[in-house]
Image (cartoon, rainbow, N blue to C red):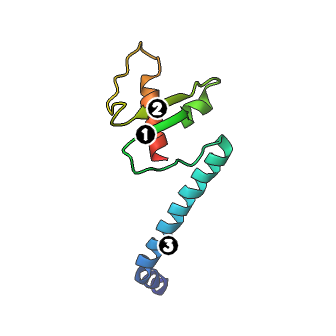
Amino acid sequence: MTALQCKVLERSPCLYQALEYCAQLDCLIAMAMAAREHGYCRPALSSEPRIRIKEGRHPLVELCTGVFVSNPTLSSETEGKVKILTGPNSSGKSIYLKQVGLIVLM
């Protein structure tokens, strides 16, 4: 058993690298499956410093509620980069911010 442990320890950098690749592949496959199931689309990238989201949806909230209203987002030099969100408690301000963050991340 000690010989086997020594061999595994010798190969641990290679094993860790293989595990890292497997984890990345697992994440990509999970995101691809979610995109297919929920109708997400690939973003169109541009060199302009702008975020434009049409009919944005929060992935988790949409699954938990019966009705979710999609929200557009536009943030650029001409439209303003800083937004001020106002509204009563529980009106969806934080969900909107999290939605934009998740869409940009995804």
Residue that badge 2 annotates: 73
Nearer to us in this view, 49 or 40: 49
Above or below: residue 69 compared with residue 27: above
Residue farthest to the right, as pictured: 37
Q: Position of residue 82 (x, y in %)?
A: 31, 30
Instruction: Describe residue 34's horizontal placement relative to residue 16 as left or right.
Output: right
User: Which label sits on residue 86?
Assistant: none
Residue farthest to the bottom, as pictured: 3
Mark 2–mark 1 contact, CB under 8 Å?
yes
Mark 3–mark 1 contact, CB under 8 Å?
no
Pointer 1 local density, CA inside 10 Å: few below 14, some 14–19, many at least 20: some
Q: Position of residue 70 (x, y in %)?
A: 56, 28
Mark closer to the chain start, 2 or 3: 3
Residue at point 49%, 84% (across, down): 4
Which mark's residue is nearer the viewer, 3 or 1?
1
Measured in 3D between alpha carbons, the distance from the residue under mark 3 to the one under mark 1, in whole angstroms, is 35 Å
Instruction: Describe residue 51's horizontal placement relative to residue 36 as left or right.
Output: left
Q: Amino acid at mark 3?
A: Ala
Residue at point 46%, 32% (across, down): 73
Nearer to us in this view, 25 or 36: 36
Q: Amino acid at mark 1?
A: Ile
Pointer 3 local density, CA inside 10 Å: few below 14, some 14–19, many at least 20: few
Q: Is disc 1 placed on a helix, strand or loop?
A: strand
Nearer to us in this view, 63 or 3: 63
Residue that badge 3 annotates: 18
Q: Is disc 2 placed on a helix, strand or loop?
A: strand
Which mark's residue is nearer the viewer, 2 or 3?
2
Mark closer to the chain start, 2 or 1: 1
